[in-house]
Image (tube, rainbow, N blue to C red):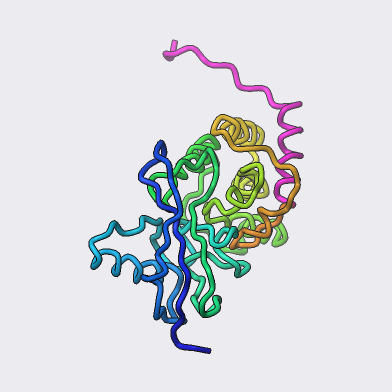
Amino acid sequence: MAETIDLKLHVWRQKGPSDPGKFEDYSQYAKGISTHASFLEFLDVVNERLVLANQEPIVFDHDCREGICGMCGIVINGEPHGPQKATTTCQLHMRTFRNGEELWVEPWRAAAFPVIRDLSVDRSAFDRIIQAGGYITARAGAAPDANAIPIPKRLADEAMDAATCIGCGACVAACPNASASLFMAAKIGHLNTLPQGQAERDKRTLAMVAQHEREGFGACSNHYLCEAACPKEISVQWIARMNRDLLKAAMTYKPEPQRAGGDG
């Protein structure tokens, strides 16, 4: 394999959420790219060359660059995070692409993810969905001995599978309905699976689903593209569990009556 490759690069440029955007050709800045570089390092090189040419660098989201934070949301040739399965954009290496290959790079496409600039989008809707779920009332305290936790290993493993969601939004970008159901189901499911999450289970489920609707995300229609795009390979079975919990909560949950203020 060649140590360097030349690429035909097209990048979506947009000044803000209310501005029109378009693809710009940056092929002249995408030559001699190391195959050992990650995709974000590739964009760093392109930006350095743009700056030297007195042009505006490309804005894109990034943070840890270790596949943990979920910030690196980019669609590459129509695929969230690119063509490699179970891989975030920051972990995608340029050896994945062929010399002379054409790349079309754009942001997540969803009404609930307005473009901030270029490839950067506002994903604070995810934060508000999590906030709607609130906190568990069970006291966590200091870390107990592992053998003292009354949780069957099967449930602990399942909860950890759901908790691996990094909130990147690839599920939304891949879904034709721009649904965040897989993200929401993972966040609901990892607490609803554990004994500590049972006290607020119904309230949490109803509140988070309601916030999902308010944010303008679409409904799940079982295309399974969310699971295919998820870099952590979270199963759509969590959506089925969420729907079950939602139905049960809608039928049985009764909000606690508001108590009057004061102690008297």
Residue sitting at x 60%, y 32%: 213
Left of 63 or right of it: where is 87?
A: right
Residue sitting at x 42%, y 41%: 20
Vertical relation: 259 (above or below) 154: above
Report which quarter residue 206 is drawn in. Answer: top right
Report which quarter residue 256 is drawn in. Answer: top right
Left of 231 or right of it: where is 115?
A: left
Rendered location of residue 73, percent (x, y): 49, 56
Residue sitting at x 42%, y 13%: 262
Rendered location of residue 149, percent (x, y): 61, 57
From the viewer's side, name the closer residue of 51 and 144.
Answer: 51
Report which quarter residue 228 is drawn in. Answer: bottom right
Residue sitting at x 49%, y 39%: 125
> Does residue 200 appear in this view?
no
From the viewer's side, name the closer residue of 84 and 250.
Answer: 84
> Does residue 204 appear in this view?
yes
Image: magenta residue range: 237-264
Residue 253 forms part of the magenta stretch? yes
Vertical relation: 114 (above or below) 159: above
Left of 176 or right of it: where is 38?
A: left
From the viewer's side, name the closer residue of 132 and 105.
Answer: 105
Number of marks: 0
Q: From the image, which quarter does the C terminus lie in? A: top left
Rendered location of residue 41, percent (x, y): 39, 71
From the viewer's side, name the closer residue of 154 and 138.
Answer: 154
